[in-house]
Image (cartoon, coloured by chain):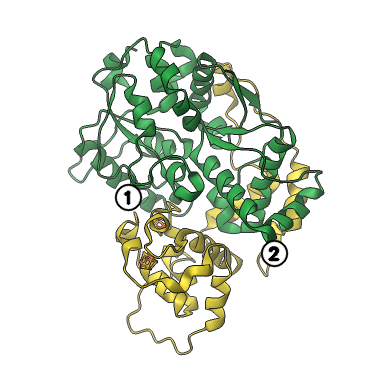
Chain colours: A green, B yellow
Amino acid sequence: MVQSYEVFLGCAIPNRFNNYESSMRAVAKELDIKLIDFDGASCCGTVVLKSIDENSWLALSGRNIALAENRGHDILTPCNGCFGSLKDTDHVLHDDETYRKKINAALKGLGLEYTGKAKIRHLVEVLYELKDEIEAKILKPLNGLRIAFHPGCHLIRPSNVAGFDDPELPRKVDELLELTGAKCVPWGLKLSCCGSPLLITSEDIATNVLRDKMISARDASANCLVTNCPACHTQFDVQLIGMKDENGESLELPALFVTQILGLAMGIDQEPLGLELNRISLDPIADILGI
Amino acid sequence: MTEIWGQFKSFDGKKFEALDAEFTREVSSLLGGKDLTACFQCSKCSAGCPVSDKVNIQVHELMRMLLFGIKEVLETDMVWLCTTCYTCQERCPQGIDITDIIFGLKNMAFKKDISPPGYIAARKSLYDQGRLYEPTEWEREDLELGDVPELNVEDTRKMLDKTGLMKLKEGD
Ligand code: SF4
Ligand code: SF4
């Protein structure tokens, strides 16, 4: 059955991870997921605007939800930040009449209204439901790949808002990745924040949070890191460049998006997977990936 | 450069003369603030917090300051160094929406001009462009991706004028 969604890209993907969008589109095409361009989308507001002014955040984010609702569509986003922001807004506007009235008053001037009909889904949620189809399409197993999978905070927490996976023992995306023959290693700081929201506040502390995490990934003998979020990926594929531990040893690890792993294993053409845009060299695992 | 945020660094030698019940009430009215008084100081929040070892004032201490109505809480580094990871909120045995309360404290601090400068720039881009970052066209062309759908910024500005985004502080 063909599913269709308005695809909410957010700001970070078109800015620095176009390979995530491109690999998502390639995988979605294989699986008959129809992605409709989200006309008129603004920033989701993300934790940045929620930190500045909650009313403005609810209005900006609520407008995006109302736009999709107005067109009778559900929303799909490949970004944890957008997912968290839109889900959280939906949660507040759904449960709290005072906020709903206030935000609808601001939306009225634009001819829009939030009533809560549009569903907000993360890309990996939709992919998880298509597990069997994906399994049947695996053509090039990635045996020997040891993935430290980073779910990211807003995909799973707060669980009463995200509603996706077990907040203390998430396994759904790991299950998807393991369909490719790869192993998702258990690692101590898997659930811990990557630190990316602190880049705006203190790059030093954001870096220290990341370093803690990378030491944990190394201790688990992972040979790559996989994410489903451009904000987290900024830490793992940009900020990580050149990072060393206290003995001067490199902590760099190849970082890929979930859709790049699935795409490779499904035998999709390498071009749209955009692997040449991954900043940290994929050479250490090139043989396993077959690139 | 001295930071303007996070200047409350220790309780040592500090005396708090009048505890401000009005402040506690104000915080209780924030999104998530209603269960604030249920905190029994078990410190589970701080135990799982990714920045506990990097801040001067930890999150369980922040929660106690709120209950006691100590306004200096807005000047602690915990407010702006909270990554918004929601681990504490997920795990609090008293079901307190800790992370959401901290968002409210950030709002209060921003109004008083106690915020990292990055947030001031972010507010301006969100108002002016409706986005935080612009698309990187050459990458999109290489990958044969279409244009990012257009946004009518007049619309988002009109709405943000209603919510008063650019007039939050006294000086705005
Ligand atoms: S976990 Fe909850 S009850 Fe325990 S100290 Fe933190 S806020 Fe208080
Ligand atoms: S949400 Fe903030 S205070 Fe709570 S655990 Fe995460 S970083 Fe610490």
Residue B157: image location, x then y, percent: 74, 48
Q: Chain of mark 2?
A: B
In which of the image's four quarters is ligand 2 placed? Answer: bottom left
In the rendered view, would you say A201 is above or below A270? Answer: below
- Residues at badges 1 and 2 in contact (C-beta under 8 Å)? no
**Amino acid type, label 1:** Asn
Name the secondary structure under disc 1: helix
- In the rendered view, does B27 fall on the left or right side of B8? right
Residue at the spot 54% in from the left edge and 20% down from the top edge: A25
The quarter of the displayed image where residue A77 is located: top right
Task: Give the class, few, some or many, for how many residues have Cα within 10 Å of label 1's Cα (few <14, many ≥20).
Answer: some
On the question of residue A279 being in view, the answer is no
Q: Is mark 2 within 8 Å of ligand 2?
A: no
Q: Which residue is mark 1?
A: A208
Residue at the spot 24% in from the left edge and 42% down from the top edge: A216
Q: CA distance from mark 1 to mark 2?
A: 35 Å
Name the secondary structure under disc 2: loop
**Amino acid type, label 2:** Asp
Task: Give the class, few, some or many, for how many residues have Cα within 10 Å of label 2's Cα (few <14, many ≥20).
Answer: few
Query: Looking at the rendered structure, which numbered label has been put on residue B19?
Result: none
Residue A139: image location, x then y, percent: 36, 9
Q: Nearer the viewer, residue A172 or B167?
A: A172
Q: Nearer the viewer, residue A4 or A255?
A: A4
Query: Looking at the rendered structure, which numbered label has been put on residue B172?
Result: 2
Residue at the spot 50% in from the left edge and 23% down from the top edge: A24
The quarter of the displayed image where residue A152 is located: top left
Q: Chain of mark 1?
A: A
On the question of residue A28 being in view, the answer is yes
